[in-house]
Amino acid sequence: MPFEFSPQKLVYGGEALGYAQGRTVLVPRVLPGERVEVEPVRIAKGVVHARPLRILEAAPERITPPCRYFGQCGGCHYQHLDVERQVCWKADIVRETLQRIGKIAWDREIRIHQANPWNYRNQAQLKVMTAESGDTALGFFAAESHQLVPIEECLILSPRLNSILGQLRQPRWLGRLRGCTEVELLANDQDDRVRITLHGNPEADAPERLADDLLQQLDGVASVVILEGRGTRLYGESVFTYRVGEFKYRLSPGAFFQSSRYLLPELVKSVTDAEPGDFALDLYAGAGLFTLPLGRCFERVIGVESHPAAAGDLQANAESHGFKNIRAVRQTTSDFLRRFAQKDPDLVVLDPPRCGVGNSALKYLIDLQPRRVHYVACHPPTWARDLACLLAGGYRLEEVEMFDCFPHTYHIECLARLVRPDLASR
Ligand SMILES: C[S@@+](CC[C@H](N)C(=O)[O-])C[C@H]1O[C@@H](n2cnc3c(N)ncnc32)[C@H](O)[C@@H]1O
């Protein structure tokens, strides 16, 4: 049954939270201060998830979403708010998460980094679906669903990726994508070279013929990867690179790379900004985005990365830049820390996936007694949980920064700088 609802605040995950009929209610695309008619969709752990039916009284800050797919496509969450207000809410969410999950009362500044809020994504995971009629479509999934929303253009994708999307959705290409489940696009820093990764088994063509035509006929396509089952076939240029500042990173298929392009140099600068020292650890190092700049600042650096392709890139990137002082270790952070005996790193950089670092690995880390820890995270809840553990282990939170790498979505990149006051002057 529909009911009336007045949200109180925006919360992590893109929804607005409020209370109705004695229950907590979460609703997307509505704003605090509004009166809305909503309809329950499901109840999970006592919380009612509902969808908005009608705005009965709009908040003054509500704007018309610039994207015509907003509300259907699940990619964006905040296009009904201008970017400045989005950022204010995101900073509030970071503070609230630190308090609620980490029990950390952070009332000092959160330094905010912002850039162009449009065309910022250098990567896209386009879904491919074929209807019973045989028609194939390309687009993104609707929120919390596997229902395809066909897309002509996405305002947060780089211009090059939009141009490729525009071409791929023409019937002559769509038919040839049948049998694929996903088309993954990665553009380089100049937005002039693209790697296309096809997941699945293209039915209409021999894979090499399709790859060849994509390479020849789509402007800017430098390589094509076809991932089918456990096999990987690569066509075109064998090495794909992305430049950030003075470093050029080799990125292999399957290896993680940051997907927001404008704030990357600023993120790298903030994360690696430290006094020169003897020894730094970069845990969850990926292809070495932070490891290489750390190699300029520290006598010795160890980068730890568990994904085989990313660990290979880390090693190759350190070598291609002539770093003799960087060691790439292919291991999980937890396994590495459990066996690593050398104490007293000057700096440890942490950049884990959404699940965070976790208590047991943090315990090993605290035992190593790093002087400083820079913890960058894409998932504030696990970041706040882990920060609480570091504070209990003797660390002091010195600075919090927020990178609005993903405007119009609820995603946030956070950075915490911590120090062990008793070791700081070591
Ligand atoms: C958020 S990414 C950060 C990568 C890199 N710092 C960057 O910014 O490009 C997290 C990385 O941790 C790696 N990873 C995931 N679980 C790991 C683990 N348990 N131990 C070590 N690395 C892990 C992933 O493969 C991924 O490359």
Image (cartoon, grey):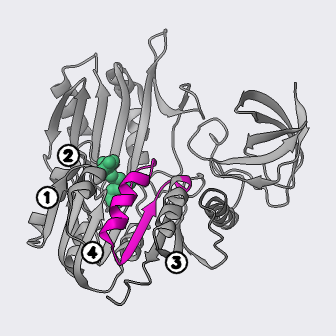
- Looking at marks 4 and 3 on the same chain, the residue that comes earlier in the sequence is marked by 4
For this orientation, the residue located farthest to the top is 132
Disc number for residue 345: 4
Magenta segment: 352-381
In this view, 32 is above or below 56: below
* Quarter of the picture holding the C terminus: bottom left
Looking at the rendered structure, the kind of residue marked 1 is Gln
The residue pinned by badge 2 equals: 309
- Looking at marks 2 and 4 on the same chain, the residue that comes earlier in the sequence is marked by 2
Looking at the rendered structure, the kind of residue marked 3 is Glu
User: Residue shown at 29%/54% (left/top)?
Assistant: 333
SS under mark 2: helix
The residue pinned by badge 3 equals: 399
The residue pinned by badge 1 equals: 315
Looking at the rendered structure, the kind of residue marked 4 is Pro
- Which is in the foreground here, disc 4 or disc 3? 4
Q: Position of residue 154 (x, y in %)?
A: 52, 46
Residue 246 in view, yes or no = no
Looking at the rendered structure, the kind of residue marked 2 is Ala
SS under mark 4: loop
- Looking at marks 1 and 2 on the same chain, the residue that comes earlier in the sequence is marked by 2
